[in-house]
Amino acid sequence: MLKIRYFIISFIIFSSIFMINTVHSEELPLLHKVITIDPGHGGRDPGTRYGKILEKDLNLEISKVLQKELEKQGAIVYLIRDKDEDFSKNTDYRKKRGDLKRRIDFIEEKQSDIYLSIHLNWYSDYYYRGSEILYTNVNDKNKILAETLRYSLIDNKIKTRELKKTDLFLYKNTKIPGVLIECGFLSNRDDRYLLQTTKYQEKLSKAITDGVILYFNK
Ligand SMILES: [Zn+2]
């Protein structure tokens, strides 16, 4: 009798462990996907600014929130920087170029499936607001990723502008699919307020994560 009970208990434990494992792998849509997040600027390069609010700091905050959201969905996520630094060297003839080149190397060394560059916008007309996604035509996937992310932002009720093309150095010099996400305008009062709140950073990160999941499902 004791043996039977022992057998039944073992069976229940074994099958529940098995079920948990199955459920988990089914529920994690980004399992094994390698995603590199590039928090724009850093160190000697602050990016754009509004008073004491620096783009480089908000880029990093948002990137860390986005990292958590992507990891929750099973992705392997690398941040190009997790502190206030840049990657230029004193020996670089062009500091910004050196910094960007090392970011590209990082994305490629990690064998990323995709990369996401996180930035903030600025425009002299302070009515301009909303997020904006930019891509290059260096491969066919960039546009698909950009469109999917834009769709997801709209679906998650995040203000989004039309897609834009860019030929900035970083984006045209790697074949790995990726886009530049301008999360909002530091020059606009409403965007500036939202971008500093954890709630909005999470909302934005969830929307981007949804878009990434859609992209990989295509
Ligand atoms: Zn920027």
Image (cartoon, rainbow, N blue to C red):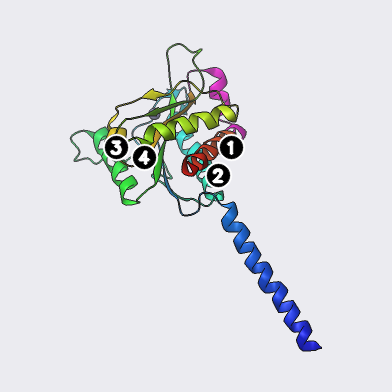
Residue 79 shown in magenta:
no
Tell me how far mark 4 sits from mark 1, CA to CA: 24 Å
Q: Label 4 amino acid?
A: Pro
Tell how many labels. Answer: 4
* 2 and 1 marks in contact (CB < 8 Å): yes
* Residue matched to label 2: 69
Q: Where is residue 23 in the image (x, y as percent from the top left)?
A: 63, 58
* 4 and 1 marks in contact (CB < 8 Å): no
Secondary structure mainly formed by the magenta segment: helix
Q: Which mark is residue 71?
A: none
Residue name at image x 70 percent, y 76 percent: 11
Q: In which quarter of the image is residue 210?
A: top right
Under tag 4, what secondary structure? Answer: loop
Tell me how far mark 1 sits from mark 3, CA to CA: 27 Å
Question: Is residue 56 among the parts visible in the rendering?
Answer: no
Under tag 3, what secondary structure? Answer: helix
Left of 155 or right of it: where is 15? right
Q: Which mark is residue 202?
A: 1
* Residue matched to label 3: 100
Foreground: 77 or 83?
Answer: 77
Q: Label 3 amino acid?
A: Leu
Q: Where is residue 1 in the image (x, y as percent from the top left)?
A: 81, 88
Sooner in the amino-acid sequence: mark 4 or mark 2:
2
Q: Label 2 amino acid?
A: Glu
- What span is colored magenta in the figure? 186-200
* Residue matched to label 4: 177
Sooner in the amino-acid sequence: mark 3 or mark 2:
2
Q: Where is residue 195 in the image (x, y as percent from the top left)?
A: 54, 29
